[in-house]
Image (tube, rainbow, N blue to C red):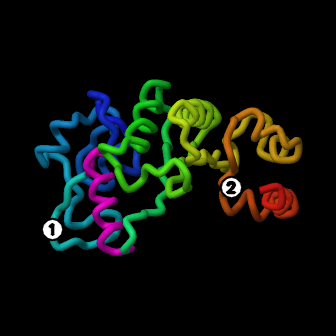
């Protein structure tokens, strides 16, 4: 969910590289050259896991074709169901670039089918949801955009936005992906949202 210093999206969980690579470097300061040359890799011991060898951190443009290939080999019909989480507070152009890549037949041929929902874009915040939804619509795609709701992520509190049913209107998202603690705390309201589709 990160973008390199030279604006190439890559797949990484943390805001800093230290925990998973052993290098104390902010994720947004990483260059694509550091990733493609192998200067930054997951170590043989990362996040409590032991690996037989270090492995590279993938650029999004590298991962998507590999995901398509894996889907053809393991699913059999070439369709891969995947959720792409756009998880950072990114600039509008970066969000648009990621959506363009996800919907590009050249980069992710198995994910491009405008009549099905093999891809779900999960946005961390309202800005990301709005920009992603607008870009999906520009592609005339039916790819749904979901707004991920965590405690403390919405001004005025989660309860107000869920109870008022204004969250879809405000964000433009097709759905809500609620953190388990939100779902458990507001279960009747979340069931109501499920009933609405």
Q: Residues within 10 Å of mark 2 (few under 14, many from 20)?
A: some
Span shown in magenta: 58-75
Seen in the image, is 164 located left or right of residue 14?
A: right
The quarter of the rendered structure image containing the C terminus is: bottom right
Mark linked to residue 178: 2
Please report whichever mark, 1 or 2, sits nearer to the chain's N-terminal start. 1
Relative to 170, is 103 above or below?
below
Name the spot of residue 184 as percent of width and height, x first: 77, 65
The chief SS type of the magenta part is: helix
Q: Which residue is drawn at 86% across and 58% down?
A: 192
Q: Residue 41 carries which label?
A: none
In this view, the residue in front, 66 or 114, is: 114
- Spatial separation of the CA atoms under disc 1 and disc 2: 36 Å
Task: Give the percent coordinates (x, y) of residue 64.
Answer: 33, 52
Instruction: Tell me the residue that label 1 is attached to.
Output: 53
Residue 81 percent coordinates (x, y): 48, 62
């Amino acid at each position: 969910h990160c973008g390199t210093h030279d604006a190439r999206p890559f797949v990484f969980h943390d805001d800093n590289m230290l925990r998973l690579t052993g290098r104390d470097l902010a994720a947004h300061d990483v260059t694509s050259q550091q990733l493609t040359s192998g200067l930054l890799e997951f170590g043989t011991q990362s996040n409590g896991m032991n690996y037989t060898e270090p492995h590279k951190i993938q650029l999004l443009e590298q991962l998507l074709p590999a995901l398509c290939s894996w889907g053809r080999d393991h699913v059999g019909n070439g369709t891969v169901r995947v959720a792409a989480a756009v998880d950072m507070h990114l600039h509008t152009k970066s969000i648009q670039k990621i959506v363009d890549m996800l919907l590009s037949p050249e980069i992710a041929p198995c994910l491009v089918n405008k009549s099905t929902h093999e891809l779900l874009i999960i946005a961390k915040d309202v800005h990301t949801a709005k920009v992603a939804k607008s870009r999906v619509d520009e592609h005339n795609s039916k790819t749904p955009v979901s707004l991920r709701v965590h405690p403390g992520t919405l001004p005025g509190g989660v309860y107000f936005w869920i109870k008022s049913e204004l969250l879809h209107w405000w964000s433009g998202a097709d759905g809500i992906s609620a953190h388990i603690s939100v779902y458990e705390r507001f279960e009747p309201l979340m069931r109501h949202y499920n009933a609405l589709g």
